[in-house]
Amino acid sequence: MAIRPPVRSCSLAACALTFALTSLPARGADPILMFVLGFAKNVIESNLEANANKPAPLPLNPLPPLPAVAYKAPAAMTNDDLRALVEDSFAYLDRAQRVELLTGLEKTLADPALALHREAILGEFVMVARQVGFTHRQLDRLSSAQKRALADQFAANYRSLSPAEQQALMQQLRQRALPLPADLNEMMLTALAAAP
């Protein structure tokens, strides 16, 4: 059975989200980020299931694959490598937020009390940064219609959250603190504003 291009891009995003969600340790994961990533994964998987039995439309030009990247081992990364990783993986954050993130990382890595754990901390940060960057790029590759559908489903599920969770999530969206493409972030804010 032929796979439709929109489903194909959803499949890539679902794989990215699944990888990101299964690799993040529960103790260090931001609950709101985990909710958004889990929600996005569920919507994409639902879209895949819903489209599985539909006839394939005329073939469209598929998205080009993301280029393969050779990564440095975390222990071999220099400060310039870390700066480049933060710039690439957290591009959705504004400049001040990326500087704050990098400064916090450098401070943590330089803390003598954490010297024994430096390699593990660095490895964990690099892994999460790469997953966040990959997930952001996959979400960015979705069509406008797919992003709108994701935003609408997100708004519907948002109502099931407690008021405190809704407020925290809204604040994260307004601050552009979630790994969402700018247009998807705006669509989510618009969908939430229109939600009853």
Image (cartoon, grey):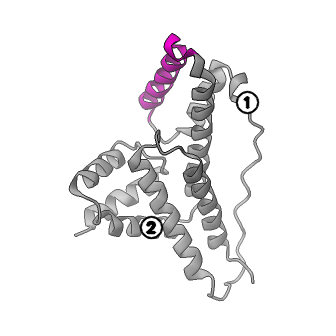
> In front of the other: label 2 or label 1?
1
Q: Residue placed at 35% from the left, 67% from the top?
A: 157
Q: Is residue 97 magenta?
A: yes
Q: Earlier in the sequence, mark 2 or mark 1?
A: 1
Residue 178 percent across, percent down from the top left: 43, 46
Quadrant occupied by the C terminus: bottom left
Rendered residue at 73%/30% (across/down): 73
Q: Quadrant of the N terminus?
A: bottom right
Q: Is residue 127 magenta?
A: no
Residue occupied by mark 1: 73
Q: Residues within 10 Å of mark 2 (few under 14, many from 20)?
A: some
Q: Is residue 144 visible?
A: no
Q: Is residue 120 above or below residue 113?
A: below
Is residue 126 among what the camera can see? yes
**Viewer-side residue, 190 vs 165:** 165
Q: Which residues are magenta?
A: 94-115
Percent position (x, y) of residue 128? 57, 40
> Position of 33 compared to 196: left or right?
right
Amino acid bearing label 2: Arg
Disc assigned to residue 148: 2
Residue type pointed to by label 1: Ala
Query: Which residue is painted at 39% across and 55% down in the image?
Result: 186
Q: Residue at x 55, y 81 (%)?
A: 50
Answer above or below: position of 7 versus 122.
below
Characterize the local packing of mark 1: few (<14), some (14-19) or many (20 or more) Cα atoms within 10 angstroms. Answer: few
